[in-house]
Image (cartoon, helix red, strand yellow):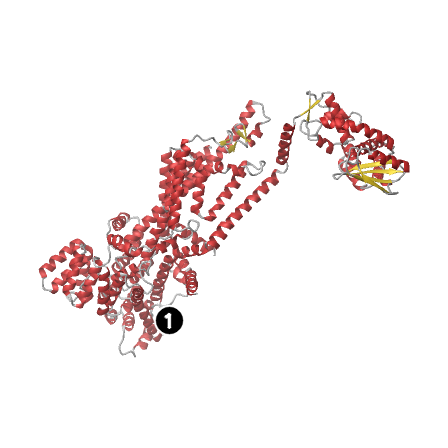
Amino acid sequence: MVLSGTLREFILADVFQLLTQQKITGKLILNNGLNEGIVVFKNGIIVAAEKNDENLSNKLFRYLVEIKQIASNKIRELFASHEGDICSLTKEIIQKGYLAESELKFFCESVTEDIICSLFVWNTGKYRFNSSENIDSLIPANILITSESVIMEAMRRIDEWNRMKSSINENTVFVRNQKDVSKTNIIDPFKATAEYLYNLLDGTSPVKEFISSSCLTEYKIYEGLYELIQQKKIVPLSDKISRSVQAALEKKKQDQTNPVSSTISSFVLSMGIVALIVFCGHFLFNSIILFNKKHEAHISRITPQIKSSKLTIHIAELFYESYYRKKPQTLLDLKDFNLVSDNDLYYYSLEETVDSEKNRRYNDNSE
Amino acid sequence: MNQILLRKLFLLLIISNPFLLYAGNSELFWSDWIQSAIISRESFFRSIEIIDDFKLDKLNSHQKSSLIGKMDSVLSPDSWHNLLYGIIDDDESDNYFSKALHNCRKDPGTTWLLFIEFTKIKEKKFAENALKQLHKLLLEAGAQSSSLISQQLLHFAIESKSNKTEALEYIKWAKLFDSFSIQPEQKEFWISFPVSIITKLKYFISSAFFFNGHWETHLRLIYSLYVWFRNALLLFVLSVFSIYIIKYFPSALHFFADLFPGNVSLTLRTLLVSSIMLSFISFGFIPFLWLSAFLIWRFVNIKEKTLLLCALFFLLLTPVDAVIRNIYHRTLDPDSVAMIFSGAVREGYSEQEHRKVYAYCKNNPSDYLANLTNAIYSLKNNNLVSALNYGEQALALHPHDPVVQTNVGNIFFLNGNFDKAKSLYKLASDNGYVNAQFNLAQCLFHDNKTASATELIKKAALGDPENINRFLQNNDEYFTDNWPSLRKIMFADYQPKQFWTILVPSSIYSGNDVEVLWGNSFMGLSSRNSFILSFVLYAFLLIITFKLNNKRNLRITFECRYCGRVICRKCKTGLLCNACSDAIKLVHNEKTLHKIQLSIWSKFQRFRIVRERVLNILFPGAGFLLGEQKPYWISLILVSITSLIYSFYFSIVHDFIIREGFSLKSVFLTISFSLYNLIFIIKQIPLFIKN
């Protein structure tokens, strides 16, 4: 069956009803430009749903780790091994005794319902239906949700949602109204959502952090917070303060994470800048651009020393030959007899540099 | 390669040290005579199969008889034959040695080699006779000195280091053969050190400041004093800048340090930024110092500003230093006209030098000194016509110069034109030239005006007793009544005063050479532009000094109350830096707080104290200036004294030690200079222990 179209208000209810009536099996894919949602139908009954930013696997993972206190590495292995097959995953969870079947089913139904209801809020976008018989792996814990119940719930939630959205922004930070001692025992988020959220509040985390890090869906979180607001147990911080707190937290996060890497990167950056400056100054500027001036100045400075050393060596050679009746084999012979010093030999050795420079300049001038 | 790098470092410390530059030319006076004498000696020894290391003073009877056999066939024995006969035949040795000297009475090369052989076989009397003969030949050639012989005699003094008397004897002869050179004086000073300190200091001071002696000696001494003070000023400027850079860079560069992540320690951030700033030295030292001055200017107090302004003033004068160094280099360049002229006056004829100055004269016909030099060389080469020609040209170009007048007068004298010579001598002697007075006396002797001539000679002797009396004594000793023509007159060279007033303005200064020497000292700008730019920067700093003093400025940096590190409003928490604040933020107990405060404070205080003490050990006074423990003026005086002492050691003493080699004296000198640091080390050790 080919079913597709553009999303607008209340259209999704009609689509659901149609699919239920047709007792169709397949995936209804919705897209509002930013996110994508999928509702899986089996014989006209909803059996699964997921959204980009919210899906059952993540929520289930967090539930098992935070609420059921199961070691995260065990759960991670389990989830990894059942990647893409939520049906076998849920079976495995039941089999391993992490959750009772009824509890798991309740969880999956609750989360799936929340996801589907959140899709009803989309006013723009497109939808299309893909018939597919091969959807068993997408069904968690054999849940079955009738379209009528979902539609009714979704309609109810739309009004609620608009009311809650006016009081709660995803960047809002809530603080407790009174100083309570936090309860240390674990509260079931599904049984006492408001209380669970109340315990999570630390005065620094915004709402979006709860959405991304807890096992509750967005709607449940908003619902819980709204309830707490109604009960005057929590108050929101102003936007300005919230933003400032966020900025301070961001900075603190940066400060706390990897001071070693900051130090190393600062050091490397500084040395890079030093190397660049030295390269520009010493090699580029002095040795290339001003090479001639530098070289000529150097030659000008050493030329008197060279002439002096030549004279000293000439006298020393003459003396050596006069006294020892033989020519010195090397200039080091003169040094051995203390007739010349290391300085004299050094400057004498520079004579070649000066001569070659003079020849080069002479050739340049004649050209 | 490593040696070359070490030498470059060495060069930085003793740049343009005057004592390394010897006067003279590459083909020195009598160099050719000695070389031909060596060839002649070698061919003789080879002919009788004497090999190189044959010890003539240790011949056995068999060797002696073999040598006699080889030499018997020679009909007219020369000096070498007679020398060997003298060595072989002990009874007739004096006779043969005298003959040997007599045979080479006109040959300075062979005379010199004979002196060496006599010295080797320990015939002291004949060695001295050989030197006397050589001295006579020197005077006959119209010379007053031979740097070649003098230098070689100094080598003999080095060889006889262990025998002080003998070494001093050789130095005495070296002085006789070159009384204008400073080398024998230095050598004598070193050998008699520390006994002769006062005497030599008097000599050096009189040559440098009282314009006694030859201009070359005077210039070398003055320049070595200049190098000493210049290096002292350099050290002073460097020390002042270093101290204020250490003190104020953390404040000046704090803004840049804050650009690094906050979780990098403040100390490391400051170090990294400082190292970036220091890397700008690669663009040049002078630009870096100016940049540093501008960076730290707003943070220094008024006293420190005054000191920095002084240091910057010296920096401003660095182009002047290039001019002074250029004058020195140009003057004492062996190929400079001044040196060649001096050589022509003092030494005998050298064909190579004559050719050099002849070629120079052709290209620079208006250079009076070149013309005069040409004239003197022609005269000493017996070419009177050429001498007269160039002499008259020199006189036309520089008619009022007493040196020109005296030397040209000599040409006229030797040409037989006594009237002209007299008029020139009169002009020169009216300016106080004693050589001209002496020469005028010779003219009067020629005119049989003996009484006037004698009076004039007495007057000249009063003016310069040493030179005049020595001239007369030498003539009487060697020539009695028969003075050679070149020994009848005295040639004139510039005295130290005339060197500065006449020679330097007319021929020494060259703007182009100054620019070459200046090189890329200030970002490739010429010396004049560098001076102008430095002046503008200096004036700008003065202006902003007054403006900053009048305005009340808001402090932008502070010091943490605990650790003393530099912080700003953005990175401080109350009166503390973030690190100290973090250390105490969870502490509420007063005692614990006080303990933490004390521990932070003492840690950083210890570092500061160690830094100051180490600076005081390495450069006494610098630590006091940095730490402000002593009164400001005391610290300043100490830094100045340290600069002077260090400069004296590295500019003058160190080179002396290097040249003279390792000995107890050099160790003593090194230790005595380290005593200055030792005093500070001894003072610091108990303080280190106490801290």
- Foreground residue, B407 or A31? A31
In this image, B381 relative to B318: left or right? left
Residue B397 image point, x, y percent = 24, 60
Question: Is any atom of residue B558 visible in this view?
Answer: yes
State whether residue B202 is above or below residue B133.
Answer: above
- Foreground residue, A105 or A206? A206
Q: Residue at x 26, y 77 (%)?
A: B76
Q: Secondary structure at mark 1?
A: loop
For residue A311, what is the image quadrant? bottom left
- Foreground residue, A21 or B447? A21
Residue A74 image point, x, y percent = 78, 37
Mark 1 Cα shell of 10 Å, populated few (<14), some (14-19), many (≥20): few
Residue B191 image point, x, y percent = 31, 53
State whether residue B596 is above or below residue A278.
Answer: above
- Foreground residue, B469 or B190? B469
Q: Residue at x 71, y 21 (%)?
A: A233
